[in-house]
């Protein structure tokens, strides 16, 4: 869906109201550690896809809690917004945060595996050992990537 400044503003407005509603109006403890990451409101404002993130081990509980609280959230959304209609809410897990965390862990593991470390005193990376650099050359050549050696 193409977004212009008006649709971005409507999406952000819906996200903010839903997030505030979860923080101050909904008392379900399963929804305490939920973050609303985004909303997509349809052009006619009849539907709103709400994207959220939570702890991976509580996805099922949070989904059930949203199913139970959907009507109340919609009602409070209608009271707080001056829209002609109250959109039907559809909740979706936003796994992009989980993916970013997985990538960060993989990069940290790879950095540790290669022997890189951050110097505690000045926050700069410590030099990489010659063995680690030679190992990268071999791996890059074997995978078809560019080698650091001169031809």
Image (cartoon, rainbow, N blue to C red):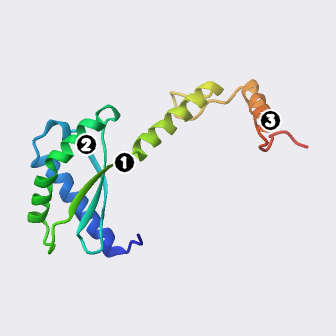
Give whichever of 150, 87 is nearer the camera.
Answer: 87
**Quarter occupied by residue 106:** top right
Label 2: which residue?
63
The reply to whether dot 3 and dot 1 touch (C-beta < 8 Å) is: no
Closest to the camera, between mark 3 and mark 2, is: 2
> How many C-alpha atoms fall within 10 Å of the one at disc 3: few (<14), some, or many (≥20)?
few
SS category of the residue bearing label 3: helix
Q: Residue at x 52, y 34 (%)?
A: 123
Give whichever of 98, 118 is nearer the camera.
Answer: 98
Q: Residue at x 23, y 62 (%)?
A: 14
Q: Is residue 84 above or below residue 104?
A: below
Closest to the camera, between mark 1 and mark 2, is: 2
Q: Residue at x 42, y 72 (%)?
A: 2
Q: Classify the position of the N terminus by image quarter.
A: bottom left
Mark toward the start of the polypeptide (3 vs 1): 1
Q: Classify the position of the C terminus by image quarter.
A: top right
Mark toward the start of the polypeptide (3 vs 2): 2
Whole-angstrom CA distance, mark 3 to mark 1, is 36 Å
SS category of the residue bearing label 2: helix
Closest to the camera, between mark 3 and mark 1, is: 1
Give whichever of 77, 141 is nearer the camera.
Answer: 77
Give whichever of 36, 71 is nearer the camera.
Answer: 71
User: What's the mark number on residue 49?
Assistant: none
User: What's the mark number on residue 142?
Assistant: 3
Label 1: which residue?
94
Q: Is residue 104 above or below residue 20?
A: above
The image position of residue 119, as x and y in percent, is: 55, 28
Q: Is residue 62 left or right of residue 28?
A: right
Whole-angstrom CA distance, mark 1 to mark 2, is 12 Å
The image position of residue 87, as x and y in percent, is: 20, 65
The image position of residue 4, as x and y in percent, is: 37, 75
> How many C-alpha atoms fall within 10 Å of the one at disc 1: few (<14), some, or many (≥20)?
some
């Amino acid at each position: 869906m193409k977004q212009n400044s008006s649709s971005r503003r409507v999406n952000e407005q819906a996200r903010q109201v839903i997030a505030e509603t979860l923080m101050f109006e909904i008392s379900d403890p399963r929804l305490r550690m939920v973050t609303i990451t985004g909303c997509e409101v349809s052009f006619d404002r009849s539907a709103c896809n709400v994207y959220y993130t939570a702890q991976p081990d509580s996805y099922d509980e949070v989904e059930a809690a949203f199913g139970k609280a959907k009507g109340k959230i919609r009602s409070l959304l209608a009271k707080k917004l001056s829209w002609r209609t109250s959109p039907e809410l559809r909740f979706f897990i936003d796994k992009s945060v989980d993916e970013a965390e997985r990538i960060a862990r993989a990069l940290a593991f790879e950095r540790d595996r290669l022997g890189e470390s951050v110097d505690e005193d000045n926050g700069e990376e410590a030099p990489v050992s010659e063995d680690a650099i030679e190992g990268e050359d071999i791996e890059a050549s074997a995978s078809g990537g560019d080698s650091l050696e001169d031809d």
